[in-house]
Image (spheres, helix red, strand yellow):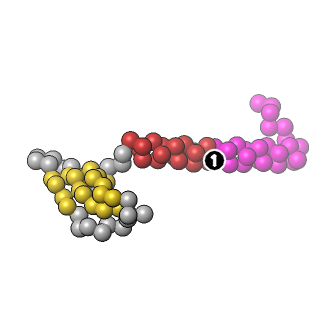
Amino acid sequence: GFHPILPFLVYPLDNSHFFLTCHKWGTVGLWLRWYDETGWIPTPAERAEEERQRAEQMERALAEERQRVQQLLEQLRSLGVNPDVE
C-alpha cells in the first residue's frame, strides 16, 4: 500500500491545475505521480483495471437482475398467469 516515507515533493506546472509529486512507496522505490485538484491521476494500466472492475460489477448486477426477473416470472406462472402472452 501507499506508505510515504519521504515528504511529498510537489512540482506545480506553470498555469496549470496539474502537479507532479515524488514520494517513496513502501520499499519498492521512488514514484512520480501526476495529480490534479481531485487527487492522483490514474496510469493507463490503473484506468484499465478500474474499467475491468466496473465491467465485472455491471455484469454481476445484470445477472442478479435477470435472476430476479426469472423469479418474478415463475411466481406469476405459479399463480396461473401466463406472462408470455401479450
The answer to whether 13 appears left or right of 36 in the picture is left
**Quarter of image, res 63:** top right
Residue farthest to the left, as pictured: 14
Q: Quadrant of the C terminus?
A: top right
**Does residue 6 appear in this view?**
yes
Residue 26 position, x and y percent, is 38, 65
Dot 1 falls on a residue whose secondary structure is helix
**Quarter of image, res 8:** bottom left
Residue 84 position, x and y percent, is 80, 33
Q: Quadrant of the N terminus?
A: bottom left
Magenta stretch containing residue 70, yes or no? yes
Q: Identify whether 28 is placed above or below 74.
A: below
* Number of numbered callouts drawn: 1
Residue 72 position, x and y percent, is 77, 47
Write down the residue under mark 1: 60
Could you tell me the amino acid type at mark 1? Arg
Q: Nearer the viewer, residue 79 or 47?
A: 47
Q: Nearer the viewer, residue 44 or 38?
A: 44
Q: Nearer the viewer, residue 35 or 32?
A: 32
Residue 48 position, x and y percent, is 45, 42
**Quarter of image, res 85:** top right
Q: Residue at x 23, y 67 (%)?
A: 7
Magenta stretch containing residue 54, yes or no? no
Q: Identify whether 26 is placed above or below 16.
A: below
Q: Residue at x 68, y 48 (%)?
A: 64
Mark 1 residue crowding within 10 angstroms, few (<14) / some (14–19) / many (20+): few
Q: What's the magenta region?
A: 62-86
**Does residue 39 appear in this view?**
no
Q: Identify whether 49 is placed above or below 39.
A: above
- Specify the principal SS of the magenta part: helix
Q: Residue at x 36, y 48 (%)?
A: 42
